[in-house]
Image (tube, grey):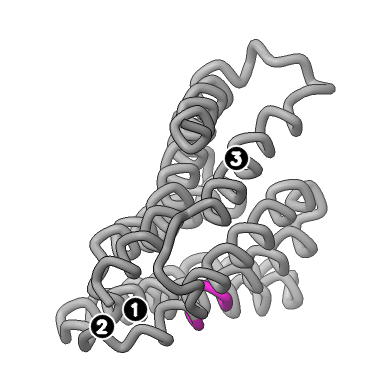
Amino acid sequence: MARKVLILLFFGLGLYYVFFFETIDSSLKMVFKLLPMIFLIVLAFLTKVHVKSPYYWLISIGLIFCAVGDYTLQWFIIGLSFFLVGHIFYIFAFRSTNQQNTPLYVKIFLALYGAVMMFWIAGSLLQKGETVLAVAVIAYILVILTMGWTSFRTGSKFAVIGAILFIMSDSVLAINRFMFDVAYSHILIMFTYYGAQFFLMLSINDYDRLR
């Protein structure tokens, strides 16, 4: 019962923040942004598993770091750092499974996509003389693509969907912040972001079932 209530609260508040952002008082925007993640973290820890495996703990801790990243993203490099650590926890979670190999076509696509994004965004920042930010962006791109790469090793469709949605969310965020204004950027970023975290939370139970 508690789990169903938390899922309803996550979807209700998450969708409200995504689609009715402009109606929220500025002093409450961060509260509405963080509450869905708090519900997800609680859901992760309430997930019933046969054994609380490293996967269970690593995904749950990753969610916590991402929630802190949500708050600290107002100081971009700090928030980026927390998200990067969160992704590292996800990578270790995915690597702990070793269910199957990542398909070659996935490796090729992610490598090409990463190269294009680094050349485009980091290259633009370097031209502007923002070396530290460019290095941070390159590091982040490498980490999140590794997260996507290793998600395929889990054998969990939820882990793969979550990783792909996260890459989509961060790609739109980076393009909107550094290159040009993306139409409906808030909706695109937050809808895919909440979706990514929700599927990653679900992958805990999926992994337990596949073991």
The quarter of the picture where residue 69 lies is bottom right
Q: Which residue is mark 3?
A: 39
Q: Are marks 3 and 2 in contact (CB under 8 Å)?
A: no
Q: Helix or strand or loop: what does disc 2 sit on?
A: helix
* Residue 117: percent from left, percent from top: 44, 68
Q: Amino acid at mark 2?
A: Lys
Q: Nearer the viewer, mark 3 or mark 1?
A: 3
**Observer-nearest of 156 and 184:** 156
Q: Which residues are magenta?
A: 88-92
Q: Main secondary structure of the magenta part?
A: helix
Quarter of the C terminus within the rendering: bottom left
Marks 3/1: CA–CA distance: 27 Å
**Observer-nearest of 78 and 40:** 40
Marks 2/1: CA–CA distance: 7 Å
Q: Which mark is residue 149?
A: 1
The quarter of the picture where residue 166 lies is bottom left
Q: Mark 2 or 1 closer to N-term? A: 2
Q: Mark 3 or 2 closer to N-term? A: 3
198 displayed left or right of 20 = left
Is 89 in the magenta? yes
Q: Helix or strand or loop: what does disc 3 sit on?
A: helix
Residue at 21%, 86% in the rendered image: 100
Residue at 65%, 73% in the rendered image: 85
Q: Residue furthest top?
A: 23
Q: Amino acid at mark 1?
A: Trp
99 displayed left or right of 132 = left
Q: Amino acid at mark 3?
A: Phe
Q: Mark 3 or 1 closer to N-term? A: 3
Q: Which residue is mark 2?
A: 107
Q: Are marks 2 and 1 in contact (CB under 8 Å)?
A: yes
